[in-house]
């Protein structure tokens, strides 16, 4: 379901791009702004919304999970605080989580779109969002430990371009925190210690192993993005891309759809619970897809996403770069 | 709900048990990966940590006219400090650590030996927790970068759960063991 921009609940500040009908864009000039300036404004707004407002599908899943925990337990206490945090972040227009994560953009564009200038605009928007506090100073030189404070650097932000046949521009953004990234996992089957062979039964075993190893360290209840097959690099990237699917959106492949449901049910019998406190809900959903593999490899990748699930997306006009519709 | 107020003491934290929900009022010092490595390497702490609580946190801090304001401040994963934490407890006399995800056997042993507890804050709850920070008194080791610096924070009713106490109990150890046993049955 795609909603109109104006339907989205708005936070008290920096709402210009979210209220296109009120003509409050560019307070000082009150005139048309250049497409480049508009692009930066739209991108900053996408970053702000991603960092501060939990997507509706995740919000529903979290509230459902809260209802299932037994009251007066550490687990229900944790879920209460999560729900309070969701409200507070939206109201104050401040980050849901202080770890504003790896900034991962997927840009879907029509043929003929110029990528290089748009990369520069993304960089400006990221720098501005860091100054505004929507992003933490979160990019560190892996060799020197230096933090330039801009969120720009080797590989940061992560930007992927995909050509599509539509006229509009689609900008998807994920802010993936370090805690959940650290508990994400990759397996090469057969995995003898787990008795996991090269079939879906083996895939199931390694996914469950990853969840047990993660315990509460990935800020559960989390969501699993899984890729069966592919090489090590694309397998993990594709696992992560599954997290752009809405929760509850089942795989079109019957066997994978069944596995998604079964994994979620089984994980929720492990007793790890919210934040690893013990309890009913260990994961909110599991989203699986597959890639072909070479005969010698059978890679399975599990990308763990925390409950503070930051992903959003919007369609933009290709010429004016004005925000049209939110995707989640 | 138990209230733990500043100044903290070994005696007060020795009374806490796994499962206790605690509201902390007083002072916290943030310290995460770089700070723990720095102290582990034998460098002197820029601030006296005796009877203090270290918070595993890299906050979002905005510079304002009259100082600093913390706008997001949830816990980071504690297990990365497992190689260092016991030593920081021994050498610096801290009485508590706040983080998320729990810590391992070395830290649990150090909690028992030196009189400290592990408090679990709710990961990802950066706004609820930042609301409890009333002011920032100081910042040390800022050269490590904002998230890695030691921020001296004043807090009021900061909500945490004791998940490792000074009597050898760990909720994390228990949940890990039971979930592994459950997994065996489910495989």
Image (cartoon, coloured by chain):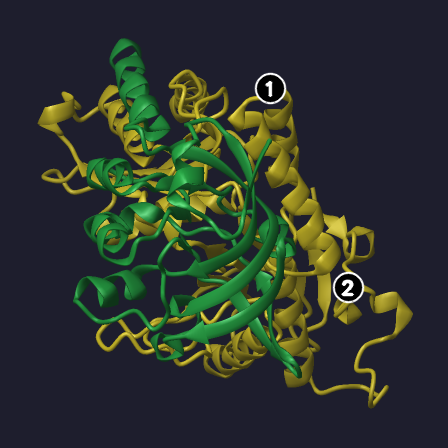
- Residue for badge 1: A68
| Mark 2 Cα-neighbour bin, 10 Å: few <14, some 14–19, many ≥20 | many
- Residue for badge 2: A18
Residue A119 visible to an observer of this rendering:
yes
Q: Nearer the viewer, mark 1 or mark 2?
A: 1
The image quadrant where one finds the N terminus of chain B is top right
Identify the residue at image location x=53%, y=52%.
Answer: B6
Q: CA distance from mark 1 to mark 2?
A: 34 Å
In the depicted structure, whether residue A34 falls above or below residue B129: below
Residues A222 and B35: in front is B35
Residue B35: image location, x then y, percent = 31, 65
Secondary element under disc 2, as helix, strand or loop, is helix
In the depicted structure, whether residue A117 falls above or below residue B167: below
Quarter of the image holding residue A20?
bottom right
Subunit bearing disc 2:
A
Residues A120 and A84: in front is A84
């Amino acid at each position: 379901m795609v909603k109109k921009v104006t339907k989205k609940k708005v936070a008290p500040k920096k709402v210009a791009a979210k209220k296109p009908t009120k003509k409050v864009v560019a307070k000082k000039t009150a005139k048309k702004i250049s497409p480049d300036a508009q692009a930066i404004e739209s991108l900053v707004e996408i970053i702000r919304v991603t960092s501060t407002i939990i997507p509706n599908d995740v919000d529903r899943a979290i509230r459902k999970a809260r209802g299932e925990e037994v009251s007066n337990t550490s687990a229900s206490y944790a879920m209460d605080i999560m729900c309070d945090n969701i409200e507070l972040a939206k109201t104050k227009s401040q980050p849901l989580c202080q770890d504003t994560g790896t900034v991962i953009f997927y840009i879907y564009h029509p043929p003929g779109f110029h990528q290089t200038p748009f990369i520069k605009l993304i960089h400006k928007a990221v720098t501005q969002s860091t100054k505004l506090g929507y992003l933490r100073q979160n990019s560190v030189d892996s060799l020197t430990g230096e933090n330039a404070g801009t969120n720009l650097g080797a590989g940061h932000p992560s930007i992927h371009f995909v050509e599509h046949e539509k006229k509009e521009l689609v900008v998807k953004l994920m802010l993936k925190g370090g805690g959940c990234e650290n508990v994400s996992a990759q397996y090469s089957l057969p995995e003898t210690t787990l008795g996991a062979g090269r079939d879906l039964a083996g895939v199931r075993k390694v996914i469950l192993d990853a969840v047990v190893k993660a315990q509460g360290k990935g800020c559960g209840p989390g969501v699993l993005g899984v890729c069966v097959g592919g090489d090590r690099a694309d397998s993990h990237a594709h696992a992560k891309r599954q997290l752009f699917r809405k929760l509850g959106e089942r795989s079109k492949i019957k066997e994978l759809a069944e596995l998604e449901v079964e994994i979620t049910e089984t994980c929720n019998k492990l007793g790890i619970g919210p934040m690893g406190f013990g309890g009913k809900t260990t994961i909110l959903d599991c989203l699986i897809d597959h890639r072909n593999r070479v005969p010698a490899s059978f890679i399975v990748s599990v990308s763990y996403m925390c409950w503070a699930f930051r992903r959003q997306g919007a369609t933009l006009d290709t010429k004016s770069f004005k925000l049209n519709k939110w995707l989640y | 709900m138990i209230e733990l107020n500043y100044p903290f003491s070994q005696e007060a934290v020795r009374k806490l048990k796994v499962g206790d929900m605690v509201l902390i009022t007083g002072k916290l010092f943030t310290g995460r990966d770089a700070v723990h490595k720095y102290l582990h390497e034998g460098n002197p702490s820029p601030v006296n940590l005796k009877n203090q609580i270290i918070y595993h946190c890299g906050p979002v801090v905005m510079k304002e006219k009259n100082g600093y304001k913390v706008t997001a401040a949830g816990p980071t994963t504690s297990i990365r400090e497992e190689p260092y934490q016991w030593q920081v407890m021994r050498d610096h006399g801290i009485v508590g650590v706040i983080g998320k995800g729990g810590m391992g056997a070395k830290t649990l042993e150090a909690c028992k030996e030196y009189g400290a507890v592990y408090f679990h804050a709710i990961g990802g709850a950066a706004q609820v927790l930042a609301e409890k920070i009333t002011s920032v008194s100081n910042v040390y080791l800022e050269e490590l970068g904002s998230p890695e610096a030691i921020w001296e924070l004043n807090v009021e009713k900061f909500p945490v759960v004791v998940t490792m106490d000074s009597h050898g109990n760990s909720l994390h150890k228990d949940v890990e063991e039971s979930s592994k046993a459950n997994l065996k049955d489910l495989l």
